[in-house]
Image: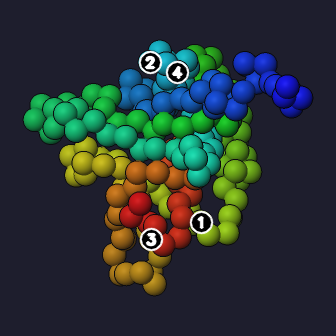
Amino acid sequence: MNNEPTLPPHHEPSFIAQSLKREVYRNLHFRDETVYSVRKDGLVEGHALTVIMDGTTKYPITFAVGPKGNQRVRDEQRKNVHAVIRGHLCNAVWYNSDMDVDASEMGHAKDACDYFKAQYMIEREGYVWREVLYNPYKYRTFVTRDTNPFRGVEDVIEPIFTARTVIVGPKVWAQIKIGHEAN
């Protein structure tokens, strides 16, 4: 007989990991602000100004681009949803329609975005922060931009597929392993 305690099904690590798994993509319907849609199980859960995603070695954050969608954008010169960041939601600053009317509400939300970026953008040994870009007219994958002048005179652009931590906001930042910049 096994005397080890067992967790209820809703407390199993795999259940918790699945319950927090989200897809995030830029919502182009918001023209004045950078707003992201957050999807769970294929349905939009809400819109956010900032999303913090945290991964592990076993469950890293992934950057996914649908090749057919990318090609359609290039052919039709019209954007569609085909590129997402997949990972575990850690925190978010949610957008609501009151922010369109009340400038102070939007100001508080932007302050919260800056606060979360400062809180989560911590240095971790063996990792480095890089800005992440995606332009379907230029690239077929998400890419990182390294502006370190010691690496080159021009910015170094490298593809990215996984990350440890991602901060999605006005700019997207990813924490990647040193030496695996082109992961």
Question: Is 136 on the left-hand or right-hand side of 103?
Answer: left
Sequence-first disc among 1 and 3: 1
What SS does tag 3 mark? loop
How far apart are the alpha carbons under marks 3 and 2? 35 Å
Marked residue nearer the N-terminal end (3 or 4): 4
Label 4 element class: strand
Question: How would you rate the neighbour count of disc 4 (Cα within 10 Å): few for under 14, some for 14-19, many for 20 or more?
Answer: some
Amino acid on which the number 1 mark rests in the picture = Tyr
Locate residue 14, reporting x and y percent: 64, 30
What is the number of the mark on residue 82? none
Q: Earlier in the sequence, mark 2 or mark 1?
A: 2
Q: Which residue is mark 1?
A: 127
Color encoding of the figure = rainbow
In this rendering, position of residue 93 left or right of residue 47: right
Task: Give whichever of 108, 101 is nearer the camera.
Answer: 108
Residue 93 in sight in this render: no
Report the Cα–Cα distance between label 1 and label 3. 16 Å
The residue lying toward the viewer, choosing from 5 and 12, is 5
Query: Callout 1: 10 Å neighbours few (<14), some, many (20+)?
Result: some
Q: Please state the horizontal and vertical placement of residue 125, each as a whole percent of the image.
A: 67, 69
Dividing the picture into quarters, in which one does residue 155 lie? bottom left
Q: Which residue is mark 2?
A: 42
At x 58% / y 47%, what residue is drawn?
58
Camera-nearest label, 1 or 3:
1
The residues bearing labels 3 and 4 have C-alpha atoms spaced at a distance of 34 Å
Question: Gap between marks 2 and 1, in whole Å?
Answer: 31 Å
| Label annotation for residue 40 | 4
Disc 2: CA contacts within 10 A as few (<14), some (14-19) or many (>=20): few
